[in-house]
Amino acid sequence: MTIAIIDDSSKDISLLYEYICRYCNERRVHASVKTFTKEREFLSAFKTEKYDLVFLDIFMQDLDGIQIAKAIKKLNPRCQIIFSTTSKEHAVSAFRLHALDYLLKPYTYARLEDALDCYENAASKFTHYIELKEGRFQTRVLISDIMYVDYHNHYTQVHTPPRLIRSYMPFGDFSPMLSPYRQFLWCYRNCMVNMDYVDSWQDSDFILKSGERLPIFKAQRKTIIQTYANYIFDYVNGGMKS
């Protein structure tokens, strides 16, 4: 999941960031966290960046948290919001905006844990993830976070924007996990790309939005490119993804 923290207190940001990292480590949840101390900086980023969950302080310098929450819901109704504040007075307004929770500062790790459990329960209704054994632990990875998957030295490698996840398993055992999701395309031997992360193609490679290049089967190049073109056409014209 992708998380944004908006708070004008660096101290409060640091504590919340620490709590979120602890939660993710204990639950083996894969997450990317970005922090903002300026509300307008966040709103500018929010127009192009995807966030599943936003922690929002109500008392900011220029815009109050309620105004920011209204903008969030307008741009992305599915984004979940957890308010954090020193006052109870805005609780009613927060829940009218369908906020997931309302954390009263200072709050404990247990209280934050409850809030994130609530998010996980809500998110499970419309998000999909896979579970991989990473070392001795099971790690959950959101389907939408996977850029591409390949195989190297007996490890299936799942590439996501924040980090690389490696699982000791044959690629043939892993690939059926992604088969229900239309956005994944076999582009080369032991390599599947999430077409949502493809920026373009050139010669015999897909070029990802990250700038990375993935090879395309030479013998099946026409078919693979046509599959990608069909996917983009359906997306632009309102086609539904799995």
Image (tube, grey):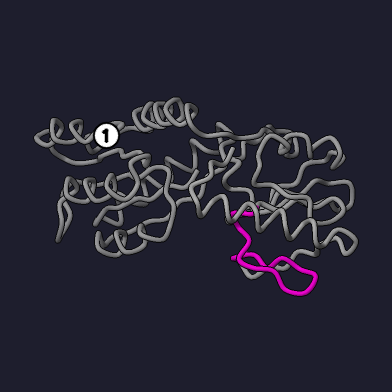
- Count of numbered circles in the view: 1
**Relative to residue 158, is residue 90 drawn left or right?**
left
**Relative to residue 196, is residue 32 drawn left or right?**
left
Where is residue 26 shown, x and y percent of the image? 55, 33
Quadrant in which the C terminus is drawn = top right
Where is residue 131 shown, x and y percent of the image? 67, 33
Where is residue 120 shown, x and y percent of the image? 46, 30
Q: Which corner quadrant of the image does residue 201 belong to?
A: bottom right
Q: Nearer the viewer, residue 88 or 15?
A: 88
Q: Nearer the viewer, residue 18 or 35?
A: 35
Where is residue 92 shown, x and y percent of the image? 13, 30
Q: In this picture, which residue range is highlighted in magenta? A: 195-209
Amino acid found under the numbered disc labelled 1 = Ala
Residue at 83% in and 40% down: 168
Up the image or down, 82 lies above or below 47; here it is above
Dot 1 crowding, Cα within 10 Å, few <14, some 14–19, many 20+: some
Residue at 87% in and 40% down: 170
Q: Main secondary structure of the magenta part?
A: strand
Residue under numbered circle 1: 99
Magenta-span inclusion, residue 63: no
